[in-house]
Image (tube, rainbow, N blue to C red):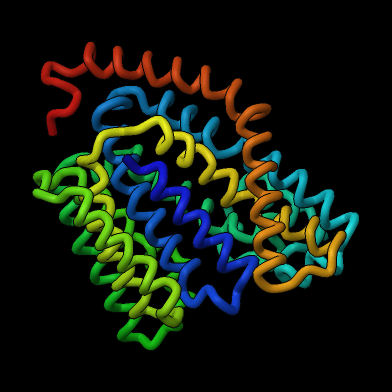
Amino acid sequence: MFGAYRFLLALMVAIHHLWYPVSGAAGVVAVYGFYILSGYLMTKIVAETYRGALVRYAANRFLRIYPMYWTAAALGLAIILVAPEDSAKLHPVMRLPETFADALYQVTIFGLRLYPVRIIPSAFSLHLELIFYILIGLGIGLTPRRSIIWFCASIGMVVAFVASGSRWLWAYHSPLGVSICFAAGSLLYHLPTPGFGRRHATAALAAVMAIGFLGSRGYLALHTGAVAAVVVTAALRQLPRRRWDDRLGNLAYPLFLFHHQAGGIVAATTDLEGGWFFAASLALALVESSLILLLVDRPITHLRNRLRTRSKLVAVTASPTPPTAI
């Protein structure tokens, strides 16, 4: 039951970008929450659905990430062309690509980590997600032993960042710095199911929000928030799926992608500020997200489901033991 949680994380990111004075560390804590959930889910689907079918895994991830991303980038490019000053005020990296390399990074996502031009400012995190999608697909967390080694190595990387006096932003934008989140999610998949339930999920989620909105951006907020996010993920994985939860979850990725574009449109067409600016931008972003789900994602979902079904058959046929066995 991760849908509402994913939507809440996307909402925290949107608040961070569109109503910054009230956001505290909400955006960065939410991004770490996304990374932990991705580590858990990607390990789960590689182990249970795409074992022995990594080409289909890669195709499924491509279809999930890129069509909506390219649609959001096209809209972002149009807004930058029409209202360049409002776009730059919203986020200084929202600028037109000036070189071929600039344009290539926007198309491929790879390379956007600290790049000074990003049509979609939050897309740097997709660059990091894709790196770990590849590593998890190659089996870095496929067994408990591998996940433990990966997690311990990631702790060492975080300690090295802190001990060296590196700014938290360097760790936040680095694959080495965020590796601990994906490793924690991957390890969580292999751990026995704890006796967590709805109460534990609610308490941990309240902690994530409190750390996010009341904390200051830095190592402390990132990693205390990450601990709370691990508990949320551990508790929610035991709750049954609900249709309303799936619907909220479907809105999470497009909201993450389209909230800057919605803010750019509102900034270019109104004089709203503060909470009213955020409310108008959020409403527009949700409309955009719903349209994208209908026009772009729904046709692709049928193809993704076919890939997933075929992969389950391949996994069962290829393995002498059940696909969930480690």
Q: Is residue 184 visible?
A: no
Figure quadrant of residue 321: top left
Quadrant showing the N terminus: top left
Of all residues shown, which one is farthest toward the bottom?
165
Residue positioned 59% across, 29% down in the render: 297
Of all residues shown, which one is farthest toward the right?
82
Image side of residue 261 versus residue 233, left or right: right
Image side of residue 94 versus residue 257, left or right: right
Looking at the image, residue 147 lies above or below residue 55:
below
Quadrant showing the C terminus: top left
Work out whether residue 296 or residue 130 is closer to the camera in this orientation and state it.
296
Work out whether residue 85 or residue 204 is closer to the camera in this orientation and state it.
204
Work out whether residue 200 or residue 305 is closer to the camera in this orientation and state it.
200
Figure quadrant of residue 122: bottom right
Residue positioned 20% across, 41% down in the render: 238
Q: Position of residue 163 (x, y in %)?
A: 30, 85
Q: Is residue 188 visible?
A: yes
Residue positioned 52% across, 18% down in the render: 303
Q: Position of residue 73 (x, y in %)?
A: 71, 47
Figure quadrant of residue 83: bottom right
Residue positioned 51% across, 54% down in the render: 10
Q: Position of residue 267 (x, y in %)?
A: 80, 64
Work out whether residue 198 or residue 117 is closer to the camera in this orientation and state it.
198
Image side of residue 25 versus residue 68, left or right: left
Q: Position of residue 207 (x, y in %)?
A: 30, 68
